[in-house]
Amino acid sequence: MPLRSGARHYADFARWREGNEIVLLQNGQAYFPSLCEAIDQAHYSVHLETYIFNLDETGYGVLHHLAKARERGVKVRVVVDGFGSYENIPELQHRFVKMGAQFRVYRPEPRGIGSYRFSLRRLRRLHRKVVVIDQELAFVGGINVHDDLVDVPNDGYGPKPRFDFAVRVKGPIVNDLRDAQIALWAKMAWRQRENWAPFYKRLRYWRRKRRAASTRAKASEGGIRAAVLFRDNVRYRKLIEHAYTSAIYRARGHVLIANSYFLPSRALKKALQDAAARGVSVRLLLQGRSEYALQFRACRSMYGALLAQGIEIFEYLPSYLHAKVAVIDDRAMVGSANMDPFSLLLAREANVYIDDADFARDLRARLEAEIKASSQHVTPLVWEKVSWWTRALDASAHALLRLGVALTGRSAEY
């Protein structure tokens, strides 16, 4: 298929790996039992990264399984974000030290008077959710260590779980995830180090061990073709955004995106507009509940323009939509990155990009089931009835977020 003009600017930079086994997990109800079972079966290592590690029933359950792993002699490393897990860090520190696990905080938030000082560095967060077990099995997605039914809406009929996804993976892409975790762990150690000689000695030892290791995850025959897409502030600044943009420009049949916070860049909006204009079905499943008012309203401020371009919008209503997934023809994306400035300009993120028609069909069917049963279709007629006052609030929220983007020096992109 010849490339369209826009697609020529966005090459497919994904580092594809053949022979992966990938299982889609919907919500914490499927994710945490699978994760805890894998921790229970770990032989020598568990490395967990998360934005939020909440001390609720689910969080205590994960702690229990990690403690049992330590009792068997399994090496446990945990990294949490300094903002996302701010309130729980002292208790987490105590518990991980007590069980003999290694624990680090990514960009700890200042306490006391220092918390009032603004710095752009404080906006650069660890937002990815990645667990690697025994260097052979991994979990990646949008699900924090957080109970599905805590801090969600309750309309009097009982709380409904957050709508979210993750994947359980085996195969060569686990090596990429493992290497990224080790690199971040080492980088966090550099900032705390005064005596560098032992560090370099350990680094040389690790490199020799890595070259000789026979535990690198292997491809399975007939497995799925997939790639891990990272976003950071040095090497992979645009990888996830370019993968999305490239796929949308190449789309021939349908684009279905579910995003909790949707404020795409000019390039992404142009790709979506181009797809809709050439007859591709473009549908967005977005947040229908205001969890964070600024992001919620800023997203809604774009509805009029998106609808005018032929893009369909659906709002998820039973609970909070936390998913960051997409199906574009026969490819699927599952991960931690939203289509918003926080994810695409500032945060460390990890998505799994899957080139498999069966997997894409499964994810698409699950999203369409929620669109049919649990969502409101925001048609142009529905949008016309929104009051001028609501539209003014939405536009103000959008302006405030754009002002925040300007502080990053990237306002031209949004």
Image: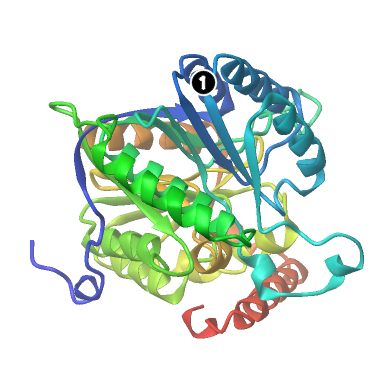
Above or below residue 104? Residue 101 is: above
Task: Tell me if I can see residue 151 in this picture.
Answer: no
Observer-nearest of 240 and 328: 240
- In this figure, what is the number of numbered marks? 1
Please state if 356 lies on the left or on the right of 69 as rendered: left
Q: Residue at x 39, y 74 (%)?
A: 267
Q: Which residue is mark 1?
A: 39
Task: Pinpoint residue 215: horizontal percent, then vertical percent.
Answer: 29, 29
Task: Pinpoint residue 21: horizontal percent, then vertical percent.
Answer: 27, 28
**Residue lying furthest left:** 1
Observer-nearest of 87 and 259: 87
Please state if 400 lies on the left or on the right of 189 as rendered: right
Residue 230: image quadrant is: bottom left
Task: Pinpoint residue 379: horizontal percent, then vertical percent.
Answer: 52, 55
Q: Residue at x 61, y 65 (%)?
A: 124
Q: Residue at x 65, y 20 (%)?
A: 67
Please state if 93 lies on the left or on the right of 229 as rendered: right
Which quadrant: the N terminus? bottom left
Task: Pinpoint residue 298: horizontal percent, then vertical percent.
Answer: 64, 67
Colour mapping? rainbow
Residue 23: image quadrant is: top left
Residue 362: image quadrant is: top left
